[in-house]
Every structure is written in structure tokens, then in C-alpha cells.
Image (cartoon, helix red, strand yellow):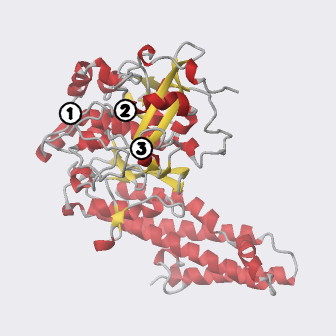
Amino acid sequence: MCTLAEPSALPPAEAAPWWDPRAHPCIPVVTTGGRTESRTLLQVFRSADEDIKTLAGSTPGETVALFEFLMAICYASKSNPPVPERWLDAVESQQPFDLAVKWLEDEPDDSWNLFHPTAPLGQNSLLAPFMGKHGVGPAQLVLEHVGDYNQFFDHHHLAHAQPLTAERAFRAMLTQHAYGLSGRARISGKATLGDTITNLATGRLGARIRVIALGETLGDTLRLNLAPAARRGTFNHTWTVSSLPRRGFAAKPDGRPVDGPADLHSVLGRSILLHPCALANGETGVDRVLVGAGELLAPLPDSLVQDVVYAGTGPNAKPLAPSPARALWREAHALYAAVADRGKRLDLYHRLATLAERPVSLWAVGLIANKTAPLSWLADTFPYRPGREEDLRHAAHTGSQIAEYVAASLWKAAFAAWRVAYPNPKPADKKLQMARFDARPEHWAATEQPFHILLDKVVAGACLAESLQAYGETLAESATTFLERRLDSLPTNARGFQARADALRTLASELQKPKAPDQLKSKEKRP
């Protein structure tokens, strides 16, 4: 097993290697030919419209973080339209990213060195004096490995010293800046920069669903999502060299205002410092890290959260947040409501509606976490076509209601079977006994595909009523099948036969009740 280097073995700062994402292949992409490969930043912008289909991070969150970084470069280089009237022309004319390429080429080399001794890219070099004594294994940098700082599902431990490649460390750093979870950092405030460096705030994307409009190429995707803005803001190269005010760590500061989209998309959500090492193959890696609290931002204006989707209405409306209990497709109606209600403000969805009838996809990503421990990434893609907003909204809302009603019916059917199968149950055993007959997990898992088929039909111009009818019939038939499989565990005796009959009768009755969605009823029962 690898061990952490002793402080005396750490190389001096002036001996740090040079690693520049403009020149090192570190951005994973999927080419239009279907290959996955890594490109440099310059290569990505030069070929964004030629042969790059999309980004390909190791997780949805890493992909979003890379996209945010590219967006920040676009804003900083004035590659976005200055006014709303020029957005559609930029998209339709496939405006190249020459400005981004030139901006990157003209940038000082010191501003892009990941291991610069005093101004490392994306990092806080004020932590450098404490690396030797307080640095930990690089597993702490990887969001999915942090958890409770102990042992993890893949047997990773924060003290595990297996180095990361510089490319992976760079991408993990960007993911931390965007999605870092709240909690206590594994760093001593008294021994380093101050007490509040241990207080980690939730990253700016950690508590909401991020929506990205996907185009035919990476260049198309960037242009679709670049908001018109005359004031682009400051790109955050590093913590110590910036015109923006940086917080201290003696006390919790107020959130600072964002000076533009370039600032927001490159904000340093964590104080991070990477320690370089030489890997066995001669490449540069990272063997120690320090991670503490980073920037705190003031509430953002609507102009800087162009993609936000609100759940609820009126004063109770809040940005749509990821939920461990609800898959993203079950919230698609909120996404399509944002599209249909585009007249409320000038945002991403308002602009997409001007694309004539050109179809696009809306990619939604969120992070599920249990307090400080990340659990899983949620990601789903929803079709959109200008002119079909209301139909899509109705299809998503009705489709979700149908699925909810079927789930409730399956629960009632399970109760009917339980009541007969367990005539004298102990209260403590009811939950486990009910689970034996509860087919809702199978129902929810199997409904995602029919729901997406429903949306695809609507986008393609199919009759909305007929598409919903086919969807409802599919769910009703599947529900009966899933319940029957659950009931197969009943004994072949009088009580078992009675429990099975009562459960199936209950499900059939629920699906035909007057309050049931019409799409679930047999033809003779429909009004």
C-alpha cells in the first residue's frame, strides 16, 4: 500500500512541475465518430464544431463541472452575444470560438499552471505552508470518496496515498468547486488559516438541478447555453491573484456579489491546494491535498441562473432540488412548465423557444447526498421542440399523475393481500410483511421508459390523447403483471388463494374507479 510522503521528502515550491490544461489533454470528449478521448483546452475550442459531440466526464457531476469551466472561458473571452437580439444569430450561424482560442493563447502562462508555487490554477496557495504537516491523501479531493472521512463503499480511505494523475485531480477540483457538500473539512483551522476554514458550505450546484440544453455538437451546446451579457465578469484563475475581494477565515464572512457570469462559472467554491509528485510512468500526479472552505456568494440575480427550474408556485416556489425519493422524470412537468411559462423572464427557456421548430434535448443533473455523504448522481435527458411546449407540459404532468395513481393502487392491493395473509400480525412486523406484496418498486423502475417514449411521441408530433392512452394502458398492464409476481410467494392453500384474489380484485377496482385517470380505464368504463 502506498504511504504518504514525509514532510522532509516534499519537494520545494520552486521545484514544482509545470502542468497547463491548455497544453495537456485533460478534457474527456466523445467525438462525432463515437470515440472517447482527451483533448487540451485549446483543442476543445478549436474543434468544438468539427468532431466533438459532447463532454464525457467520469460522472454527470464532473461533466457539468467541465462544462461550467468552458462556459467561464467563453464569457471571459467575450464569446457570448452581448445582447439578446444577437443570440439566435450566433446559434444559427455557428459562430466559431476564435475569441476563446485567442484569449487562451494570449493568457500569461503563470495563470494556467496547476502547480504554480504562488498562484496555482483554481487553488488557494495560502495553504502551502501547511501541506507538509497537514496534507492528506488525494482521495479527499474526489467528491464521491469524501463521505464521513472514514471507510467507503469501494474501500477507499482518505489516508490512502495512491496518487491521482494531474488530469484527474484537475477535474476532481472543478467538481468540488461546483458540487462540494456542506459539513466539516478535515483541516485544522487553528493550525492553518483560521477557524472558519473548516466550515464547508454547499457548492452553488449542490442543492439544485442543473439543466443544460444539448445541441448537435459541443460548440452548438455551448452557444445554446451562453446567455447574452455585456458585462461578462472576472475569470477566477486562482485565489491569491485577483481583482475580486477574497474572504478571510477568522470569522464567517458575508457572501460577496458576483461581478458577472465568468466569475460565477469559475467561482472557487473550495480552498484547495494540490501537491505534485512524479508518477511511475514519469507523468505528473498529485499525492497530497488540502481542502477547506472557499468562496461564499451573495444571493444570485435571475440573470445569472438562466437554467433554474422552480418547483411550486408563488412565494413557495423554490429551485428544483434532487430527491432520493423521486426520479428526475417524475419532475419533468416542472421543467416543461419553465419552458411553457417562458414569458415571465428572459432566460434559457425563453431563448430556446425562438429556435423555430428545431428540436433540442434538456439534460438535467443533480447530486443526492445524505448530509455530508454523497450517495448518487441523478441525470436524465428530456426532449424539447419549440411550438410543442404546452403539449409536452400536459403530457409530463398527466403522465406523472397516472404513474402516481397506479403506485397508490398497487399499495392498496398489497394491503388487501397482507390483511388476508397475516390475520394476526404484530405491529412491528407490518412494514416488512407489506413489503412482500408491494410492487411499487418494480412499477417505478419500469415506468421511466414508457414515460420517455410518451415525450418522444409528443415531440415527433403524435396525437397527444392517443399517446397518453397508450402510455396508460402500458402502465395498467404492467402493474397487474408486477402484482401477480409478488403474489406468487403466497402458499397454495385457501388463505393464499383468497389473498391473491383480493389483491388482484382491489387493483382492478382501483384502476376503474371514477376518480382514476381515464387512460387507465377499460374502453367500456371511459366517459
Q: Quadrant of residue 463?
A: bottom left
| Mark 2 burial class by Cα count in 10 Å: few <14, some 14-19, many 20+ | many
Spatial distance from mark 1 to mark 3, Cα to Cα? 39 Å
Disc with the residue nearer the chain's start (1 vs 2)? 1
Image location (x, y in percent) of residue 135: 53, 32
Is residue 269 among what the camera can see?
yes
Image location (x, y in percent) of residue 267: 32, 41
Q: Amino acid type of disc 3?
A: Gly
Q: Quadrant of residue 486?
A: bottom right
Which residue is at a point 47% across and 63% down the rendered structure image?
Answer: 330
Disc with the residue nearer the chain's start (2 vs 3)? 2
Q: Tell me: residue 130, above or below residue 351.
A: above
| Residue on which the image places disc 1 | 79
Label ID, residue 194: 3
Image location (x, y in percent) of residue 277: 53, 20
Disc 2 is placed on an element classified as loop
Disc 3 is placed on an element classified as loop
Total marks shown come to 3
| Mark 1 burial class by Cα count in 10 Å: few <14, some 14-19, many 20+ | many
